[in-house]
Amino acid sequence: MTSVASAGAGTVATAQRPPRLLLTLLGDYWWQRSEPLPSAAIVAVLAEFGVSDSAARAALSRLTRNGLLITSKTGRSTYVQLSTRAAAVLDDGARRIFSFGAANQPWDGMWSLVAFSIPEDNRTARDHLRKQLRWLGFAPLYDGLWVSPRDHAAEVTGHLKDLGITTATAFRATSVPGQDDIPARAWDLNGLRARYEHFIAFAGKLRDTTAAGLVPAADALVARTRVMDEWRAFPGLDPDLPAELLPGGWPRAAARELFICCYDLLGPLAAKRVRQIIAAYSPELARRAAYHSSKLKLEGGPGGDPSPRRENLAPDTLDHEHHSGG
């Protein structure tokens, strides 16, 4: 058991810096809740992943400065809650993560292309545009020319306007006969297949061990976070190419099935561990901790599923705000 689930502790803490890890945990077990949590309880939850007290409190401070968390005081205790802005981004990100790979959309044979030339002195806008393009499934075919098989031209045009970039254009086109496969070379499909296969091996073992009842609650919390962290990288790596452009036996569907299975199987155990930790600081709040399934249906806590909080923010805003890594 240890080799599958609890081995993730160091891996997750390393892969996710404490600010991102904290937001992941709030999104998984405090989703769409507005009640403030004791900061000491949050520090204790992060400790499950090998995050030191000082690093955890630094993460709380950083997210508060960035407007993603709101802190308040009651007596000598500090409480923390997600800002409306952060909650909206978590909502959007969750829908993106759990819908990815659900169905392969038919292809109209058209490509979306974005050509841009942005000077070095406007590097911030250029970097932000590249992140937006990757989130939409684009990849660089050549320097300054990005391509996607899906119709995202209107969205890109909006991003260009928001960023004040005028030396760029987005358009739709078809491939020249005889060179239909060239745009697909923008993606490292062999490398992506290997990454999927690595995930499938890990998640397959985790599913079997969990189904056999061999995963304790503390390990379940870490393992569920790890499986989420690894899966959510795929929407930024896999352009969701149409079946016509993919090699045979593409592993995305098998990987998605294992992710959904592991995430849902581990939910009750992981939420139990979160409640155990919070209970040491606030038994009443501990009962409100819940997990959501892959269908974004709240389970394991009181209350219904409140109306989602929405805001016009890009799904990668949290990464852009405080963590440049994927």
Image (tube, rainbow, N blue to C red):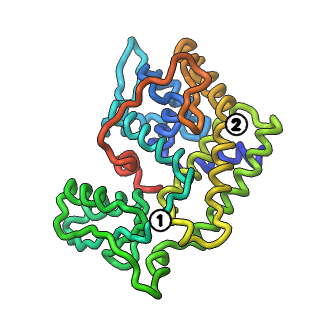
The amino acid marked with disc number 1 is: Trp
Instruction: Of the two numbered discs 1 and 2 on the same chain, state the one appearing first in sequence.
Output: 1
Kindly identify which residue carries mark 1. Answer: 107
Instruction: Provide residue 79's location: percent of width, then percent of height.
Output: 41, 21
In front of the other: label 1 or label 2? 1
Q: Is residue 179 left or right of residue 310?
A: right
* In this picture, residue 58 sits left or right of residue 194: left
- Residue nearer the viewer, 249 or 202: 249
Residue at horizontal 64 percent and vertical 47 percent from the top: 259
Q: Is residue 254 above or below residue 7?
A: below
Q: Nearer the viewer, residue 30 or 251?
A: 251
Residue 14 percent across, percent down from the top left: 56, 51
* Residue 95 relative to residue 121: left or right: right
SS of the residue under disc 1: loop
Q: Position of residue 185 (x, y in %)?
A: 49, 78
Residue 316 visible in the snapshot: yes
Q: Amino acid at mark 2?
A: Leu
Q: How many marks?
A: 2
Query: Residue under circle 2?
Result: 265
